[in-house]
Image (spheres, helix red, strand yellow):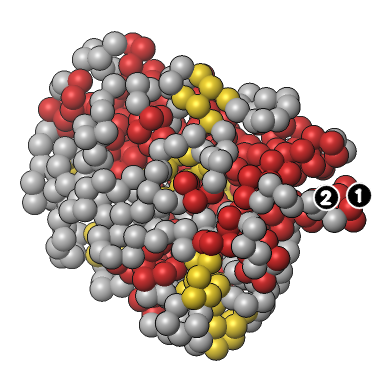
Amino acid sequence: MLDSKSMLFIKFSNTIDMKYTSINNSIFAFLLILTIGTVSCKKDFLDTVPNTSIDQAEAFSTPAKILAQVNNLYGRLQNQNLYGGRLIVFNEQRGDEFGQNDGNAATGSAVWNQNVASSNEYINDVWANAYSAINNANILIEKLESSTVIPDSTIKQYTAEAKFVRALSYLNLVQTYAKPYNIDKSAPGVPLRLVAVTTAGSSDLARSSVEEVYTQIIKDLDDAEFWLPNSYKTSYLNKTRAQKSTAIALKTRIYLHQAQYQKVIEEASKIVPNFSPYFYSSGTLSLQLENNIATVFGGSYTGNEAILSMPFANSTTETPASQYSLAFNYLGQPIIFLANNGIVANIALQDPSDARAALVGLDAANHKVLKKFALTTAPFRDYVPVIRYAEVLLNYAEAAAKIGDQTKSIDLLKSVRNRSNPEFVFPSDDLQFPDNIITTIITERRIELLGEGFRLQDLQRHGKTLPAKIGSIGTAPEVLPTAKNYIWPIPSGELSANKLCIPN
């Protein structure tokens, strides 16, 4: 395995890239080709040839070059339109915890206002970059099937990593552009592309149902779990590349969205012991809550609580542009600030006895701002948490409450709360009945996972209205689950290039 320096994600060379060509200044055609090399910045009509390229056979000719393609998959997730920041910010803008401080369209004001069009740049960029990750995963999977360059065991591991990346990318797509599973699993999902697209003219593919997409995601994660390693040689690799517990943890999130609570418990039990303190280890990997949540966001990004993080170790090739980064959006500008009537009003974020209260501050305009991502001087290089052990414990707690195991549910809930405030005692009414326990868990999720991109999906998986909210730019209306803008529209670029894809 490589050390942290060798694991720097390769973005501008030796990468397999999907190229979207411009039909006009605002619409991206879904034309894909296999390229290895620098991504062209040109926007000429039907310009499908990169500035530099090498033969694809050469790209898979040595173990090092194949590993570069694996690293490139994580680089795709790290893109500034995805986990580089914008995907998480968009999820928070669409939820109810933040007010909008900037009316500029470039800051996502229309996203906050629940008023995006299919031609919107962000609508197209998130879609395009997620499918870029998927197509690169598909290409790698297919190339590895016939590879004789690396051992079979390595082929299986790299294929598993590709399937994990594909699964996570599809999860983001289906949760963004399709109806929630619990509202209508038979509704159109997204096109399920499982075969590599390496030439133009291969774009036509109908949307699979929401249920079919979820089924494929779980299949990919089951396959990935089987072949992924238990751990890597270093903590950096353990927390920035997928291993078995990464696939398991993501499955707890997915099954929770499907309301398959027994499945959540089955998966969580693989990495969460029966009794507290909750600690899991395998090889060099350890998973448990940090003693202080400040450790999670204080520059030590590969500690025990991290299950998967997006690193930004190289400021020139990895760091997102300023307005895309979490630090800039939450604190540096801020573009979005904490809404006074949101979860920031909860006693946990008002009480200095709770360590999480220190993650909330005031800016010069007296707005309450989130300080989880506090490296506010460019380059903005805070690692982005994709999966934390705290989330898994709360997923498990909610599932246990749903099946009537109140003792387990409460113990898991308390482990998260008492990590930040050891002296806190929940009011007896909060833990007396199953519905009360679940409400308390949802509140704890809002406190613990604030700003990490979970609130929107938590509202939608419960079929809740997206509440109205107030910001410096005005008021955003509530959005009912039956409203067309409850989900994002299918991008105009996809509709233009894919004649079989129907709009929302």
> On screen, 463 above or below 150?
below
Who is closer to the viewer here, 325 or 128?
325
Give x and y (percent) for residue 493.
37, 63
Who is closer to the viewer here, 360 or 187?
360
Q: Which mark is on residue 432? A: 1
Give x and y (percent) for residue 166.
44, 38
Q: Would you call the spot at circle 1 few (<14 residues within 10 Å), some (14-19), or many (20 or more)?
A: few
> On screen, 381 above or below 143?
below
Residue at 51% across, 42% down: 387
- Tell me whether circle 2 and circle 1 mark residues in contact (CB < 8 Å): yes
Q: Would you call the spot at circle 2 few (<14 residues within 10 Å), some (14-19), or many (20 or more)?
A: many
Residues under labels 2 and 1: Cα distance? Answer: 7 Å
Give x and y (percent) for residue 109.
45, 78
Answer with left or right where residue 267 lies relative to residue 193.
right
First-in-chain label (2 vs 1):
1
Answer with left or right where residue 235 lies relative to residue 460.
left
Q: Hey, what amino acid is under mark 2?
A: Ile
